[in-house]
Amino acid sequence: MLAQERHELILRSLRRHGRLRVAELVAELGVSAITVRRDLAELDGAGLLRRVHGGAIGAGPADQTSAGDRLTIGIVVPSASTYYTDVIRGAEATAARYGARLVLGVSGYDADVELERIEKVLGIGVAGLLLSTAYGDADAHRIGTRLDEIDVPLVLMERAFGFPEVGREYDHVRTDHAYGAMLALRHFAQLGHRRIAVSLQPTVTAYWLRRGLEEAVDTLGVDIYVSERELPQTGDDPHSLAQLDAFLIECEAFGSRAVLIHSDEHAARLVERAMERGLRVPEDLAVVVYNDVTAALAVVPLTAVCPPKFALGETACDLLLRKLQSSQGPVQHLSLLPALNLRSSCGAQTVDSAHGLRAVQS
């Protein structure tokens, strides 16, 4: 059977059933699974259908709606809380505008669980996948062929894997965290601080924050001390309090009256401990936090670098859905800039972020 004949039969069957499975086409056409997948790829490239894991669906949302089946895309993230809550909400809002359905998988930052979640999401026949892997950019070499084995359009979120760590370039949307670190230190420098202490937890984000800090030292002419001490997120046990006190002593020894901390929970508890030791915030210790999830709720509202979490989910989902509509576009690497929300912990009045008002330094 010639390829053109197979293509006509495939499209006829798709119009009749609304969704096709590779295994069913193999039996119907009497050819190998490799041949069927190649045919589906050619028809996808021509805009006549959309490949999904294990088969194909109609070319667009309208085709699927008529068949009683909404376009479905998957999203797999390390966590459904804190940082990723707004990322998911942003993706969900964009999917709704397209009339699409979003299916969530959560890995818990476990690479093995992540593989299982990806397989489950793909198994329901999603048309495309949004993915923020458990691996950070510093661990790109550990990805291997995992991404290349995903057989639907893929957009990475907050990850920037590329050749040679993976076999090919992938669309990605990420926050420019290095710029975010520069933003924090630039604010300190503008307030007159020249010796700045930094606490970074062992997170994926910290990889890029370190790059930004290195650039800031050269650009701004400031001195920084990056503590290797891992601060506890919560808790009032003696060990946790000792770690917080030790970091404050490190700041004093370095001669720093300005601290950048990643992330919110650490900064809020550190401010409380500093105040218990008789320090005034911001008069004796200015604090900037990175993430801005709960920073505004601290005892002293915390100035924070805020990654555009909601916009990141929106942008990634929009990119994926546009890819599904037209697979001919180029691979895109998009970087979104975080913002600095000024609050009391650096000597500023609280920001009315809903109206976009700039805080006024006191």
Image (cartoon, rainbow, N blue to C red):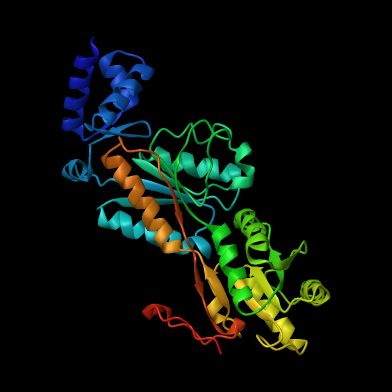
Picture quadrant of residue 3: top left
Image height check: is 205 above or below 8? below
Question: Left or right: where does residue 330 sit relative to residue 172?
Answer: left
Quarter of the image with the C terminus is bottom right
Q: Residue at the spot x=51%, y=52% of the render?
A: 158
Residue 184 pos. (x, y %): 59, 69
Question: Left or right: where does residue 261 sit relative to residue 179?
Answer: right
Is residue 122 among what the camera can see? Answer: yes
Along the viewing direction, whichever of 273 and 332 lies nearer the viewer: 332
Picture quadrant of residue 188: bottom right
Image height check: is 42 above or below 63? above
Residue 122 pos. (x, y %): 41, 39
Is residue 290 among what the camera can see? Answer: no
Residue 149 pos. (x, y %): 48, 31
Quarter of the image with the N terminus is top left
Q: Residue at the spot x=38%, y=18% of the render?
A: 34
Residue 54 pos. (x, y %): 37, 31
